[in-house]
Each structure stands twice: as structure tokens, then as C-alpha cells.
Image (tube, grey):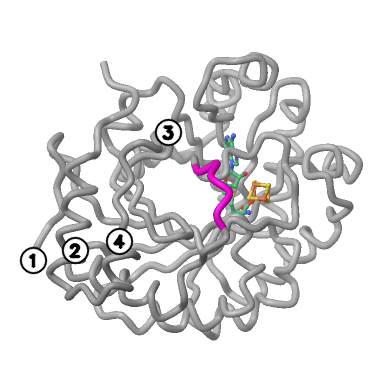
Amino acid sequence: MFMLKDGFGRVVENIRVSVTQRCNFKCFYCHREGDNRLTYDEMLPEEIERIIRVAASLGIHGVKLTGGEPLLRSDILEIISRISRIPGINDISMTTNGFLLKDYADDLKKAGLMRVNVSLDTLDAEKFRMITGVDGHESVVNGIIKAAKANLRPVKINMVILKGVNEDEVDDMVRFAGENGLVLQIIEFEWPRIDSVYEKYHADITDIENRIRKKSAKTIIRQMHHRRKYVLEDGTEVEFVKPMHNSEFCLHCNRIRLTSDGKLKPCLFKNNNLVDILSPLRGGADDDKLREAFIEAVNRRRPFFFT
Ligand code: SAM
Ligand code: SF4
């Protein structure tokens, strides 16, 4: 079995595919998957399928759909169902803001989506509006509950910790996750620069993690980024994502990204090393040529935080 390995010995097994740059929210902290270009050229479902087929032939087995907001794509079910038929792909998930999830959950499951991450930083409707610019808290909570009922398992809540905004809500969110059978993912605010936004909102989440660890019955170290997951006495799972200045995180990074306009992106934090795969595909390139694009992108991977 072929393995895509970079110059630092990291095997690439997952791909994070942005299917659109469009979004119906305006989260003030959004890193836009590290892609600030305003591009509205989106890959067609059959183009995404072809690229994932090539990825699968190189040993990639996990696909996460993201954006922008992936549920804004009117053909999202077709995209998922095409990916779900590709031999070798055994994990298909999505990260969504959840606003449209209530109406989509059952069909997403039927199309082949296995699990879902829903972004929810607060349980307070007013704070939600302040963070996202949208009056949508209730819709998102309903979407989360519907996704759990549709058996998209696990449903993970992505909670980005923002200094002075929601640090005080972790216990409430743990309770909410426990009551609804969800996994809580606590995410450190990531920012490519140390500027006034970073200074204002970045919080060190070590204390929160230590507090959760003390209450936990078991710790699991996940392969991806060596993320730590704590299982509490009542079975609730709380996972921590701490990328900033974390060389261990980068050392265990096993993913590559694909931008919505078809560029392979070796690292969230870098934009000057993209490899265009869509143009050759549209120009009639065969699978070997597309595999070369993957190999080139993987060769360009460097741990961003490296000691
Ligand atoms: N629109 C979808 C959503 O909100 O889930 C998918 C795209 S969004 C860019 C993907 C994930 O990145 C979300 O969970 C979001 O909370 C997270 N995210 C966005 N900006 C971030 C930042 N500056 N630091 C950490 N996580 C961030
Ligand atoms: Fe960014 Fe997602 Fe918020 Fe849209 S919903 S602004 S993509 S974090």
C-alpha cells in the first residue's frame, strides 16, 4: 500500500476539503481555513470526486468537508455521495456552522456522511449574535440535536475559546455535551500573526485542560496532532486542540488541505506553497499527473511550529 510521506516522516492520511468560500455567518475570529483569497471558482462534484479518487490511490482514507459553510453548496449531497463510493475512503465528516443542519441531517446521513463537527462557541443567544453576526443560536442547537438523532456519530461541538468572551462557559458546554450525547472539542484560538486580534482574544487553554483532566476517568491520545481526549466519569468526552506554538501538534499532523478552487494546501498557516491540481485536471491531465501534484504538495510540507 502506497503511503504519502513528507520530508519529516509524517504520513498524510487525511484531506480537508473546502467546498466553498461562501458563508452565511461572519464570525469575527474566522481564520477561513487559512485562505483569505476571495475566490468563487468552486470545484464541481465530479472534480472533487476525481481528486479524492487520486488521493485514495495514494493512501489517503479520511475526508473532512469544510468551507466557508459547506451546507451552502446546493450539491453537497451529491458531493458526499460521490466521495462515499470511492474505495479506500473510510471516514467522511463535515465541519458546519449548523445553521442549516436541522433540514439536512437525515439526508447527509443517507448520502454517506459519517460524523459531523458543529461550531458552537456559546450557549448564550446574545453572545452568539455578537460572535457570528447572525441571530441563529436556536437553529444551530436544533441542528445539533437533529444530527445526533440522525445517527451522525459522533456529533462534535467545536468550541473556540475566546479570551473575555466564552472562557467562563466551559462547564456549561460540558454539561450540554453530556446531556445530548455529544463530544466537546475545545479549540485554542489560532491566528497566523501576533497582532492586536491575537493579543485580544487568544487565551492559554492549559488551565481549562488541567481542570478537565483532574475530573476525568481516562485520557486518550489521538493519532491526529496527538490531541488529548478526556473521558469524564459520566462518559462525556472532552477533546483539546492546541495548535499554537505547539511543535508536537505539527509533528503529528497527518492532513493536507484542498482549497475550494482546487489548490492543494500543505499547511493551514502558509499560502505561498499551494499546488494547483484543478487546472491540470481541467486541462485533461491523467491520474499519474494528478498524483504528481499530490506528491509535490506533500514534499512542500514543513512543520510550522518546529523546535
Ligand atoms: N463554516 C464551518 C464552521 O464554522 O464549522 C466550517 C468552516 S470553519 C473555518 C471550520 C472550523 O474552524 C470551525 O469549527 C471554526 O470554529 C474554526 N475556526 C475558525 N476560525 C478559527 C480560529 N481563528 N481559531 C480556531 N478555530 C477557528
Ligand atoms: Fe468562518 Fe465557519 Fe464562522 Fe463562516 S461559520 S465565518 S466559515 S467559522
Q: Residue furthest front?
A: 283
Whether pointer 1 and pointer 2 mark residues with C-beta atoms closer than 8 Å, the reply is: yes
Q: Position of residue 232 (x, y in %)?
A: 56, 41
The residue depicted at 31 percent of the width and 27 percent of the height is 248
Q: Position of residue 32 (x, y in %)?
A: 57, 44
Answer yes or no: disc 3 within 8 Å of ligand 1. no
Give, as a single range, the part of the protein colored magenta: 35-39
Q: Amino acid at mark 3?
A: Phe
Is disc 2 placed on a helix, strand or loop?
A: loop
* Residue with the mark numbered 2: 59
Instruction: Say whether residue 281 is left or right of residue 107.
Output: left
Q: Earlier in the sequence, mark 4 or mark 1?
A: 1
Is disc 1 placed on a helix, strand or loop?
A: loop
Image quadrant of residue 181? bottom right
Q: Earlier in the sequence, mark 2 or mark 3?
A: 2
The residue depicted at 63 percent of the width and 36 percent of the height is 160
Is disc 3 placed on a helix, strand or loop?
A: loop
Q: Amino acid at mark 2?
A: Gly
At label 4, counting other C-alpha atoms closer than 10 Å, the crowd grade (few under 14, some 14-19, many 20 or more) is: many
* Residue with the mark numbered 4: 277
**Residue in the foreground of this view, choosing between 75 and 168:** 75
Is disc 4 placed on a helix, strand or loop?
A: loop
Main SS of the magenta part reads loop
